[in-house]
Image: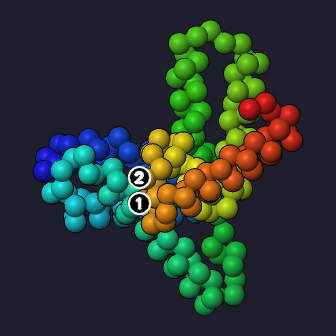
Amino acid sequence: MATERELADFLKGVEKRAFKRSVYHVRDEEAALDIVQDSMMKLAEHYGDKPANELPMLFQRILSNCTLDWFRRQKTRNALFSNMSDFEAASDEGDFDLLETYASQDASQQSESAEDSTRRAQNLREIEAEIMELPARQREAFLMRYWEEMDVAETAAAMGCSEGSVKTHCSRAVQALSKALKAKGMKP
């Protein structure tokens, strides 16, 4: 059974990645924060007594379900209200960018020219933009496999689909990203 400290440490460690993943899915920072918070609360309330090694898979599944619930609520709201602009994503200014944070941590260990730093930051923004353009299931599979570093079986369990579907989604995502980034002059 996970102790309170283990649960707290787990939630602290997964918080930023879960937020970034949610932002990629819903494209709305406030909604992403709500989804992550709801997921964390559900994990703590309903599964806090589970062993610590089971927490990552449980949390990923809860996060996926909370995201799907958000989309269902949005679909219902959109059907009820004719003014869709009330539910559009907020401005992208001021976004917390975990990829850039990791990149800047690596850069602090090496000396890097301003030109290289700027080019790297632009490349990361391009990659993130292309990830956001992927279809939802491809984006979800891609992020779980390559961002969360989950294996195929874990990803399939979290997404509620077969391992073959995960492989297909990931393959299509990688192909789409590769094609889009090559078209922009970036090398894989």
Here the colouring is rainbow
Locate residue 84: give its quadrant: bottom right
SS state under label 2 = helix
How far apart, in angstroms, are the residues tagged by discs 1 and 2?
5 Å
Tell me, for residue 173, which label it has, or none: none
Q: Does residue 111 appear left or right of residue 148 in this picture?
A: right
> Element at badge 1?
helix
Q: Amino acid at mark 1?
A: Ala
Where residue 54 appears, as percent x and y from the top left, is 26, 51
Q: Position of residue 50 (x, y in %)?
A: 18, 56
Instruction: Tell me if I can see residue 75 in this picture.
Output: yes
Is residue 17 visible in the rendered structure shown here? Answer: no
Q: Residue at x 54, y 31 (%)?
A: 101
Query: Residue type at mark 2?
Result: Glu
71 relative to 80, above or below: above
Q: Quadrant of residue 118?
A: top right
Residue 37 % position (x, y): 37, 59
* Disc 1 + disc 2, Cβ < 8 Å: yes
Q: Residues within 10 Å of mark 2 (few under 14, many from 20)?
A: some
For this orientation, the residue located farthest to the bottom is 80
Front residue of 70/85: it is 70
Q: Which residue is mark 1?
A: 157
**Hey, which residue is sitting farthest front in the picture?**
164
In this orientation, which residue lies closer to the viewer: 182 or 115? 182
Q: Nearer the viewer, residue 176 or 43?
A: 176
165 on left or right of 148: right
Q: Determine the residue positioned at 13% across, 47% down.
A: 3
Furthest toward the top, the residue is 111
- The quarter of the rendered structure image containing the C terminus is top right
**Disc 2 designates what residue?**
154
What's the residue at 45%, 46% (across, down)?
151
Query: Which residue is at 54% across, 20% downward?
Result: 106
